[in-house]
Every structure is written in C-alpha cells, then in structure tokens.
Image: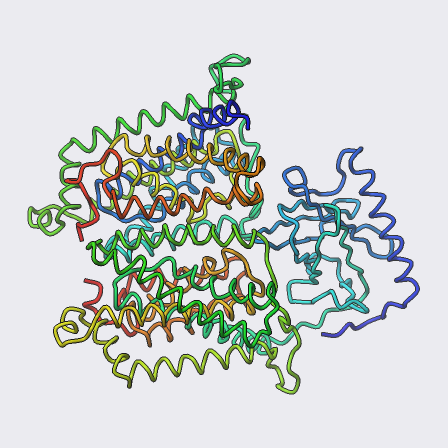
Amino acid sequence: MHNHGKPLTRSPKLIRTLLTALIAGFALATFAASPAVADEVGTDEYNFIFSGNVTYQGNPLEDVLIIVEGGGYSAEVETGADGRWRVGVPTKDVYDITLVESTLPEGVIVSDEGSDRITLTDRGATIEAEFGLTGNKTVNFFLGQGERVTVPFIDQFIERLVNGLNFGLMLALASIGLSLIYGTTGISNFAHAEMVTFGAVITLTFGVHLAFPMWIAIPLAVVLSGLFGWFQDVGLWKPLRRRGLSIVQMMIVSIGLSLMLRYVYQFFYGGSTHQLPNPGSARIDGLGPIVISPTSLISMGVAIVVIVLVAYWLTYTRTGKATRAISDNASLAAATGIDVDRVVRIIWVLGSSLAGLSGILWAYFRPGIKWDMGWQILLLIFAAVVLGGLGTAYGALVGSIIVGLLVEISTLWIPSDIKYVSALTILIVVLLFRPQGILGRRERIG
Amino acid sequence: MDFGFILGQTLSSLLMPETIAYAIAALGLAVHFGYGGLLNFGQAGFMAIGGYGYAISILSFGFPWWAGILVGMVASVIFALIMGLPALRLRADYLAIATIAVAEVVRLLFQSTIFDNYTNSADGLGNYHTSFREANPFPPGRYGFGPWQWSQDELWNRVFGLVVLALCVLLVWALMRSPWGRVVRGIREDEDAVRSLGKNVFAYKLQVLIVGGMLGTLGGVVMVLGSAVVPGNYLPSLTFYLWTILLLGGAATIFGPLAGSLIFWGLMSFLSVFLPALSTVGVLPFSPAQSGVLRYVFVGLALMLIVIYRPQGIFGSKKELTFNAR
C-alpha cells in the first residue's frame, strides 16, 4: 500500500501529536463536568472508555465512523461536530480500533508513517489498543493528504483463498473427529467444541504458565487431549451406552457437558484472551501475491500431514477398517467379531487428539486463547460435517475445506461480522436439499 | 455472611421479569418437545424475534406497545415457517443442529452492523418504555413488602408478565386436552401410526412449532419490557438454560416449566450471592469472580444429571417420556 501525495514532515507531526494529546487530555478532564458533546456509545454502561479526536489540519471532522472491536464485543461511533468520539467497552481487553477511511473527506487518508501499531485494511486503518492503569485510553489517528491505492481484487482473492484453506484444514482436524465419533456411537457431541478449547488451554498452561518450550508443550497438549477423550469414554459415554440412553438423551448430556466444561475453563483461565508466544505476524517474501506467515505455513503443513496419516489409517489398517465397518452398520460389525467397545475407545482418543491439535492451530489462527474459543466454531464444525455427510471422515474433510474457503472468501462481499452466516446458511440449505451431505448415503438420515 | 441479604436476593429473584419470561419460553419448549416431540434448539431465536420485534416497531416505526407485541408475534410465525419448512423433515438430531443454526443466523444478523439503523448492532436497543409505561394502571408509588418491593413501573412489568404467563398456561392446557393435542401427542409417540390415520403429520408439526415459537416470542417480549434488547442475550446458552428448566420441571407437563424456572432462577440468584460471600469469608479458596462462574458449571452438571437419572423431570411421568420416541 502506498501513500501518494504530499508526505507528512516530521516536525508538524510532532506538534500535532502534542496538540492532540493535550486536547484529548483536556477533553477527558472536562467531559465529566459538561454534558457530552462528542458522539458517545456505551459510556454509561461500561467503565472502560476509549476516546479520541479526529482532526485534519486543525479542523474537526464530523461523521467519521470509528469501530471498536475486541473480546467478543464491538461498537460503532461517529465523531461529533467537534470531531470527538467516545466508546465504552465491557472489559479491560485488547481492542482493535478502526477508522473507516471511506467516511473521511475526499483526498484525506490515515497516515501510517512511523507507526507500526497501525494496520491498513480495505475497511480502514486499525490500531490495536489496550488500557493502561486507568479505565480511559485515548486513541488518535493521524491524517494526511493522499489517495489510498487499493489492493487489486485478484490479490485480495488469493489472500482470502490461502486464509480460507488454512482455516478449512484446521476445521477439518476437528470435524473428522466429530464425524468419526458420530459414525461409531451416534452421538452429536456438542462437547467436541470444548475438546478443541482443551488443546489450546493445555498448550497455554504448559507453554506459557509453566514455560515449557513450545516443541514440548504442543505435543504434550495433543497427548493430554487424547487422554481426555479416553477419560470421557471410560467415565461417561461407555456407562451411558450401557444404561441404554437414547441418542437424543446423549446429545443433551453432551450439551450439559459442553456448558460445564466451558465454565470450568473460564473458572481457571478467566474471561480474557491469552496469547501464545510468537504468534508470527511476519510474512514470507517472494511468493508474489500470496500473503502468508511462517506460522500459517507450518500450521497448514501439520494439518495436511496429520489428515493424510488419518486417511491412511482409516483406509489400510485393521482398526481403521473396523471403524468404517462400525460406522456403516454397528450390529453387523459386532457380529463379524469386531470389538466395538475397543474401536469406539480408540476413536474417542483419536477424535479428541485431533480436536486438541485443531484447537492449538485455532489459537494461532484467531489469534488468542479464550474459554469459549472452541464454542465459537462449533457450528462451523457441524456445518462442515453435515455438508460432507455425517459419519463419513472423508466427507468431513471436504466439508471443512468448503466451509473454510466460504467463510473467508465471502468477506470480499459481505461484512466480516456476518461471515459465519454464509456457512450456517449452507448448513441449512444442505439439510433442506441433501441432508445426507456430499459423500453420505441416503439411508443414513433414516 | 449476611444471610438476610442472601435470602432476600433469592426470594426477590422468584418474581423477576426474567423468571416469568423463562417460564413462558420454556412452556413453549414444552409444546415443542414435551408434547410434540420436536427437538427445537432455536428457542433463543424466537425470543430474539420477540424482543427485537417489540423494540424496533416502537423505536423505528412509532407503534404503540401492544402493536409492538403483535408485530413480534407475526414475525415469529413467519420465522417458524422459515425454520420449519426445511427443518421439520429432518430426523431428531439433525433438527436440533438446524434449529441452533437458524437461531444463530438470526442473532448474528441482529448483531451485525448492516442493519445498524434499526438494530443498533452490538449495543442493542433501549428507551422504548414510554408507551408501555403510559398504559400502567398503577398510580406512582412503592408497592409490595419484604423482598418484593417495586416501583409502579416494575410492578406493572411483573403483573403484565404474570398475566401473559397465566394466559399461556391456560392456552397450553386447553390445547393439550383438545383433539388437536391428542393428535400432537400421537405424533410424538408414533408418527407413522398417526400418518396411517390420515392425518397430515407435517402440518401438525408446523403448527406445533408455530404455537411453541409464539410462546417463546411472548417470553422474549416479557423479558425486555422493562430492560433493554442486547444481542448478547440471545446466545445458544439461553436455549440451553431453557432446556435445563424444561427438563428440570418435566417436559410434558403444564406447570413443570414454571416450577423449573422458579428453581433455576432461585438457585442461580442464591448462588450468585452465596458463593462469592463464601469466598469472601475464606471458606472457598478462590476469588469471588471465580465463584460467580461456578454456578454455570452447576447448570451444566445439573442438565447432565437430570437427563441421565430423571429424564421425566420432577413433575413428569415416565409414561410421557419423549426421549425414546425415535
């Protein structure tokens, strides 16, 4: 992205910085006493307040759109006649504050010179901001003259395509597990979301809190995820199968388990977002229009290798074949001498290890670790599984890639705050016209 | 520890608008699942339609309050048709996933910045109370005694909510002992048998979805009458709480949802003050904020235990157990 036109010189910028800081400080001091002049959103409900002042060459700019997003919250505000804005936010979190450039006057853009805190997107300029010791934070954008050169559509498309593929592969790890568990036990396991979160929070515990090196923490988290799955089958699902609970009852039990685990995570890790070391925002050069960071590349590589291994295991090994036999017809499989309980237990271990790994990749993709991070993508996982055909592992892979690409690429046309709507709509449409999914068989839907 | 305060909080929560609203919405779920055997996991969507239908018609179109409720009801019928036409042909667990997805689409659209002029996106809507309060028959003043003391507006919210609840209970009771109710229960027990009697099973299911959805919508209206409409209130968790309430009281009962809601909110408010108080005096070894989270862990645990050990709920009978239908 280039900043054509007259570049800003150093000294006026410095003066402007000082001036803006002064004005903002003054504004904050007077706000309490006088009735609000600037446009305010959520300042009465919440104690943490972002504020700022949008001016260009000393003149306030009215009706400039500012978007504050973070911690699952988002708000919009337009600057008042005096160029000021204030937004209250619920938590002391890290927020992305975006100035929408299309609402600036013609020929005025946000200057990103000399500041690496600003990222420019097609929506506008975004500053990542967090609160210091107080509940107030001033965020100001520096405006300059110029025209924004937009990224060509094809480059944007390629960037979304790569992102979508990455997201889809990550979803695939989770949905293959969900699909295998559904195939062998008939449970629509809502607590699968919490197994995704489990991988991430265990990585956080070992990699950050206990300061293990990441190359130990991540495999350890995957192993512990598998153990968690084994424990769930032994402690909960097998006894419930013995009790003869119906599929619907088990589904509701999994919803209860999901609710419980989610709040157990919040109990231990709090409501805020945690970061893993080296989230890796750098990009690899020399790939032309493809924008990708080393972390994303490694993440995609790991996902592909694991998926190929699982596919090999399902197709060629004895247990893998037994798994598919059980998914096809459990009683027939049992009659041919397959130990169904044993295979189901292996599937629980495998499925939750895959989910845990997917959670770790999701932590890097979002980026960040939060108590409900798995829950945020559960419906996408279900969408992927249903799209490919419930109970078929390969279908889950195909479905995940489609959902991942769809979610990312659709943001070229629709606002990103409803990007999941496209995937959920696909879920509903597939259920309407082809409930057995792409690779499923008609008889499965009974 | 101030036991008087804790007791007061618990008792006052029994007559909160939320308690009444959850009871109405859970009664809707009883129609869906308890009587009709439909696994609707999108009740939060119906409640959102009620809340937003009411608030938007007052704020954006200047309707009086009763017209706002009517708009919500009409919108919920349309929503039930949109949800039901594809979803009702599905098997039980597919239906659950589809209804959650539909409700989430509704929530995301209300929360999105696209319709900001009407929905105020993530901030939600407030200050639509004037019309409803003008209809308040109670003169200004303080009413009630002990833990139940309200202003005239708070009293009006509660009285209106209770009247709606009573009418809904009456409606469901009358419907379920009518021939229509017998057909609906028949569908729950054995769809094919009812079909063989020449009944249009699909049409009946759609009617069940509409009736229960309208109750969900009314619950949504009652919940926001005195407060605000915030999209974050309509997460799938809301539906799960309603399910916990329903299964706690008994799915195929008239008064189960009401009893479930009283127990749920009584316990939740009790724990919301009791657990932090315990950790403040040092009985529980963690922070008050953490102990506030703990009660949601109990909700999840309770849901699991009810479904495993007493699927018919406190007041239900084993004969009317819907889980084994399919």
Between B302 and A180, the one nearer to me in the picture = B302
The percent position of residue A402, horizontal first and vertical second, equals 42, 72
The percent position of residue B8, horizontal first and vertical second, equals 49, 23
Number of numbered discs present?
0
Between A20 and A37, the one nearer to me in the picture = A20
- Image position of A268 with respect to B225: above or below: below
Colour scheme employed for the rendering of this structure: rainbow
Residue at x 13% of width, y 76% of height? A336
The percent position of residue A134, horizontal first and vertical second, equals 75, 46
Residue at x 52% of width, y 21% of height? B153
Between A139 and A316, the one nearer to me in the picture = A316
- Image position of A50 with respect to A6: above or below: above
Q: Does residue A291 show up?
A: no
Between B230 and A183, the one nearer to me in the picture = A183
Q: Would you say B178 lies left or right of B24 here? A: left
Q: Dividing the image into 4 quarters, which one contains the N terminus of chain A?
A: bottom right
Residue at x 59% of width, y 65% of height? A210
- Image position of A274 with respect to B141: above or below: below
The percent position of residue A114, horizontal first and vertical second, equals 81, 69
| Corner quadrant of residue A224 | bottom left
| Corner quadrant of residue B86 | bottom left
Q: Would you say A284 lies left or right of B33 here? A: right
